[in-house]
Image: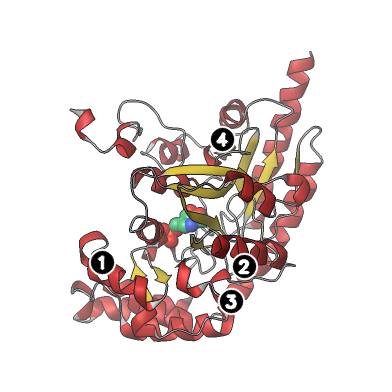
Amino acid sequence: MIEKMRKGFRGLNGGLFEKSAKADVGSSYTKLAQDGVDLMGWADPFTPDRSIPQNVLDKAIEVLNGPLSTHYTAPSGNEELKEIIAEKLSNFNGLNVDPSRNILITPGSDSGLFYAIFPFIEEGDKVLIPSPSYPNNFGDVSLAGGVPISVLLKEENGYQIDINDLEKAVSEKTKMVIITHPNNPTTTVYNRNSLVGLCDFVIRHDLILVCDQAFEDITFENEMITPAALPGMFERTITTFSVSKGMGLSGFRVGYNVTNDLFMDKLLAAAVNILGATSTMAQIACIEAFKDLSFIDNFREVFDRRRKVAYEIINSIPNVHMLMPESGFLAWVDVSKLGTSKEIYEYLIKEAKVAVNDGSFYGDGGQGHLRIVLGIYRDDEKVYDCLRRIKEALIKFQENKTA
Ligand SMILES: Cc1ncc(COP(=O)(O)O)c(C=O)c1O
């Protein structure tokens, strides 16, 4: 019977018949916590501790106590939320949009990302994905029937986009480029050179750009540029945003897609078929969060501190290294001199009692790497303790190999 399913679904492993090592598939990953393993593989700020600002919590409770929360919002989203998001898009992203025409609220940005890709990708369409990159970029394209094509980002280029590599990969069948910006897992904030080159490439080859900016709120040294705001790009870009990462509101399941009238008209028409509507309570609480985004400054301070400590600890392990994270709360660690990423991932669960992510899930360039989420727990010391345990285990691993 399985052959009756779409091709993109048939080969998937949801964890029912075979254990999946993907942190976000099935429940085997969360079960590790019951065995005393610390989970550094879910990109969810301060999990499992509290991350919500008091005023946002108060608003959520107020909505729950009132009549609205158990009723639908229109599939397009709460109008007041869209208005305040439009202000943020103007101030932060350099995008001046009409809130009622160019913003669609989505139940988280995973569905938003799929809904940015799916309307364009038909059987056999090719999609270029600079990678390592967010696994859903590959998965979403395959589910839609398209063919994801990895375009390798190189560490020696600071994981910036090399347009020559995109030129080598493009063909008549190419319809789209997807970028995660800042990138997950490498944390790269694409610089002006990368983005101007990318936009010129996208326009020259008459492609669509999907840009996932779920991690945009917290960047460090580098300027955060929104490609949709560059000349000629708004008419061919769908940008996906989220309140999960920078604002630490992942459990609210709120994201938003931003695009031009032409594309948005279709997205609005089919939103009820594909997305339904986003939680009424969560949307109203998010209005409160957008009113004063200064709480993100505290998140930034914490993550800045942690990335510097991680950089010291990880780079003090012989034969292991990482670049300084440029955004958010992830570390992308090269363990290729020790073994495969699966081998090291499994070893760390057993020896260090820490579950990170096997880098091979992040596409080309992911093998031999681990993704470590530095953003877990409220308490810095707990994070540092996990990192020290990783260090001890990786040193022991090498000693055992040479013994
Ligand atoms: C790059 C990226 N985009 C989108 C998402 C989805 O986030 P959410 O659905 O919580 O908005 C994630 C979550 O891990 C992510 O890492």
* Nearer to us: label 3 or label 1: 3
Residue at the extreme front of the image, as rendered: 172
Camera-side residue: 230 or 349?
A: 230
What SS does tag 3 mark? loop
* Nearer to us: label 4 or label 2: 4
Sequence-earlier tag: 1 or 4 = 1
Work out how far the residue at label 4 is from the one at label 2, CA to CA, in angstroms: 25 Å
> Which residue is denoted by mark 2 in the rendering?
218
Mark 1 CB within 8 Å of ligand 1: no
> Which residue is denoted by mark 1 in the rendering?
271
Three-letter amino acid code of the residue under disc 3: Pro
Three-letter amino acid code of the residue under disc 4: Ser
- Relative to 401, say whether 306 is above or below: below
> Which residue is denoted by mark 3 in the rendering?
231
Q: Is residue 278 visible?
A: no
Residue at the extreme top of the image, as rendered: 403
* Residue 305 placement (x, y as % from top left): 72, 61
Q: Residue 24: which quarter of the image? A: top left
Camera-side residue: 275 or 203?
A: 203
Quadrant, the N terminus: top left
Quadrant, the C terminus: top right
Mark 2 CB within 8 Å of ligand 1: no
Three-letter amino acid code of the residue under disc 1: Ala
Sequence-earlier tag: 4 or 2 = 2
Work out how far the residue at label 1 is from the one at label 4, CA to CA, in angstroms: 33 Å
